[in-house]
Image (cartoon, rainbow, N blue to C red):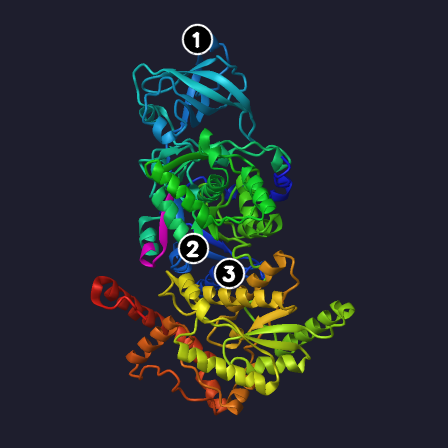
Amino acid sequence: TAVAPQAALVDFHYDLPGRLIAKEPALPRGSSRLLVALPEVGAARTELTQTLRMQLRELRGMQESLGDVADLRFADLAALLPGDVHLVFNESRVFAARLFGTPSGASAASPAPPGGIEVMFLSPEAPSNDPAVALREPVVGQVWRCLVRSAALRVGDTLTLDGPKPAEVRIAGIHSFWEEEGEDDGIDASVEFLSTGAAEIAEHVFSAAGHVPLPPYMERAARPEDTEYYQTVYANPETPGSVAAPTAGLHFTDELLDALAAKGLRRDHVALHVSAGTFRPVTVAEIQDHTMHWEQFSVTAGALRAISDSLDAGRPLVPVGTTSSRCLESLHWLGVKALVAPDAEAAGLGLGQWEAYELASELAARGTQISAAESLRALAAKADAEGGRLVGATALCIAPGYDFKVCDALVTNFHQADSTLMLLVGALVGGPERLSSIYKHAVDQEYRFLSYGDACLLVNARSGDAAAAAAAAGPSDELMVSRLRDAVLRAQDENREKDASKMKVLLHSCCAPCSGAMIEEMHSQGIDVTIFFYNPNIHPKKEYMIRKDENKRYAEKLGIPFVDADYDDDVGEWYDRAEGMEFEPERGARCTMCFDMRMEKTAAHAVKHGFSHFTTTNATSRWKDQEQVNGSGVRAATAAQALGHELDYIMYDWQTERMNERKYRINAEESFYKQEYCGCSYSLRDVNSYRKREGIAPVKIGQAGVYSDPVADAEEESPEVVEKFFRDEQLRVQQEVYKERKRLRDGGGDENNW
């Protein structure tokens, strides 16, 4: 198909020493290792990436030469993941799907290996294709899709399956030959149960005669203890149907799940019944020539709504396992289908192998965007109409070029080279080269590979839609000045034909104290700068007017244009976007939302009025996370560029010693108003809570002092003071706030909790 991604399997090959293939589980459960791979320097820098980086530095340190790869224990996951993460698990239960049989009747002349011919029951086809239903029904008459490891069998041949009550099955159809390196050739066949000697329920037949379906590369027969070890602790007895374990989940213990819940992480489940769509080897050179098997799934309306709410709130979505990820991505595109082509569901809820790519192309052609939150809510409504649970099937093949919609990071194992799973994780981390470097590190460090092996946490290289962001460690002052001069020269050169000799910069300003040094630096480089005051977050209105009027006065003194943007019309939108994030800490998700909103408005004004660049004074404050601020700026610029506009965001290290000296000198010379909180009502609430505990009077709007002593003022906001606040004080402030929230929600106070 024309929309199928172009990916050569040779690009995903790696050499795996046999000694690194885990043939036994890590004991005790959860004692495995965890490789963490963040986006490389220069790739996207989301809030999740920043938080993980800080945690990694505390836990183990980084291997910077390998581009953000760290080696941990899986038990470190609770300390590593931030509390706003939403985990999604695959709760499908493994059943004893591997049986053995011998040719019977007229087929008895067919050769059979010692121990019989292996028959792996992959998924039911009739009368129900839902494994959870088929396993609870009488087995006689059921037709299953199977891997039969004998290429000599033909349609109509029969086999007698071993077991306490031998069952007879017939090859009802052959779909293709099955090739697998190191294994006997076989057939991909439809197999019908003819008799069992009794009216047996299917699940009883498999439990009595079947074996735990360990992968062939373990090179051993299943043992009784594999019944426990090859099953996740959260597998749901109500959703049996997997013929291979969702192996990323094997690392989780009840204790780890409790620790994650205690930290505040959300958790939901889907059930994708793992079958050949996941583990069938790819035997073609190009992925577009591979045919995926369909795999069945189910999900509740409650889970769909909970995941939608997290998407709306900006919480990171972290699926556990490639099967959870494929299920979530499939659900998104099925929701898109339900919205754009509601009549297409008559044949059942299913997503074809390349259908997601076709739908993406169709939406792009229409100029239509449908968010994952919107698509999943559409499916939740459909689930409500069908008794609260949706059942469907997917053949989605994810390969490089695919844009993940519901996956900010992924917990997964290390996979075989000739698998579709390698292409999925390759798409997530940014392509085969990045994946190759991660796997080389894993081999060099002798991680254990495949189903019983170790795990990795891979962060989506494109999450947040940011094409670039600032590196964690800033360059020297001289280098930053050099870069700014280079940008000016490039702008002059690019605009020479338009008779433009200067960059035209729209400077979003949050206040005068943060503006002075930035404006002075830009003027010294010959940049044409206009101040754009847009801050609907500032509360109350009196504080807003003080900050705006002072900023305007300073601009007029310098002869710089000043744009007074909307306030009253956009305050309501700010609170709407902050809903659900009222108790986020400083530098948390609410701050990201706030920066995003202001940068979007700044970029829109810049485009409308012909500015070539924009930036913000928010990046000058030591109380702000410069990466977080710049991430919002880059996202806004990227969105404008995607619409064909020539607009760049200036990333500059405004927090160097030299810049801070200039900042506090100008602030003292101008006697700027010394603000006592960030600006929004929630920061005012939290600061007053802190001040009360420390015995300090609450903030009085308009009665704070002014900057007067550059040295003393700088010491009040020194890196040590800021670091101490975020390290020692913020948690206690949060604890007070959460107690207050509980009191209010229990009916002990006014609903207006700020």
Numbered disc 1: secondary structure: helix
Find out whether the residues at labels 3 and 2 contact each other: C-beta distance under 8 Å.
Answer: no
Whichever of callouts 3 and 1 sits on the residue coming sooner in the sequence is 3
Horizontal side of 640 relative to 204 (left or right) equals right
Pick the front one: 47 or 537: 537
Highlighted magenta segment, given as a residue range: 261-269
Quadrant of the rendered structure where residue 485 is?
Answer: bottom right
Q: Residue furthest right?
A: 497
The three-letter amino acid code for the residue at tag 1 is Gly
Q: Which residue is mark 1?
A: 105
Query: What distance separates the C-alpha of mark 3 from that of mark 2?
Result: 16 Å
Res 166 visible: yes
Pick the front one: 55 or 703: 703
Specify few, some or many for label 3: CA neighbours under 10 Å numbering under 14, 14-19, or 20 or more: many
Find out whether the residues at labels 3 and 1 contact each other: C-beta distance under 8 Å.
Answer: no
Relative height, residue 381 to residue 126 (above, below):
below
Q: Residue furthest top?
A: 106
Q: Which residue is mark 3?
A: 46
The quarter of the picture where the C terminus appears is bottom left
Q: Which residue is mark 2?
A: 312
Q: Would you say residue 564 sits in the magenta stretch?
A: no
Pick the front one: 115 or 141: 141
